[in-house]
Amino acid sequence: MERDKGVAPIVVENVAYNEQVVSFVRNLTSSFFGCAAGILGLTSYEGLALYVLGYFFVSFLLFALKMRGNLTKYYQPGYKFWIAKILDGAPSYVLTWTLFYSLVYVYE
């Protein structure tokens, strides 16, 4: 019936899978941004700014390239895509940030 009205049905399993894939991509790229922050020698608010900017940059790339601007088709509700999981990648970011900072600057 929903297809007759031009509305695609929302399948809970598909939405959960999409959230899982987005979370995986963000966690992986958080590690890469952590490596970059450590190698560049960023500390304090500079490192935090790189994490936040990197998070939104990756989110924008996912939104523009993979979702083609149609957020509600792949992610429900739409606002959760941008802000709900911002702290999920923070532990891997901090771990790689401190590791690479220590390797490059502390143990010279």
Image (tube, grey):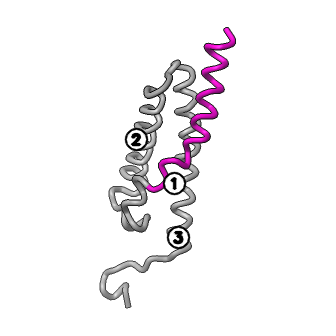
Residue shown at 56%/73% (left/top)? 13
- Give the quadrant of residue 7: bottom left
Majority secondary structure in the magenta region = helix
Residue under label 3, please give it. 14
Name the mark on residue 22. 1
Work out how far the residue at label 1 is from the one at label 3, CA to CA, in angstroms.
12 Å
Foreground residue among 20 and 105: 105
Residue 84 in the image: state x and y as whole percent: 45, 56
Residue 64 in the image: state x and y as whole percent: 36, 50
- Mark before the other along the chain sequence, 1 or 3: 3
Q: What's under tag 2, amino acid-wise?
A: Phe
Q: What's under tag 1, amino acid-wise?
A: Val
- Mark before the other along the chain sequence, 3 or 2: 3
Position of residue 71 relative to residue 54, above or below, is below
Foreground residue among 6 and 107: 107
Foreground residue among 20 and 90: 90
Q: Residues within 10 Å of mark 1 (few under 14, many from 20)?
A: some
Q: Which residue reaches farthest front?
A: 44
Residue under label 2, please give it. 57
Q: Residues within 10 Å of mark 2 (few under 14, many from 20)?
A: few
Magenta region, residue range = 84-108
Contact, mark 1 vs mark 2 (Cβ under 8 Å) = no
Secondary structure beneath disc 2? helix
Secondary structure beneath disc 1? helix
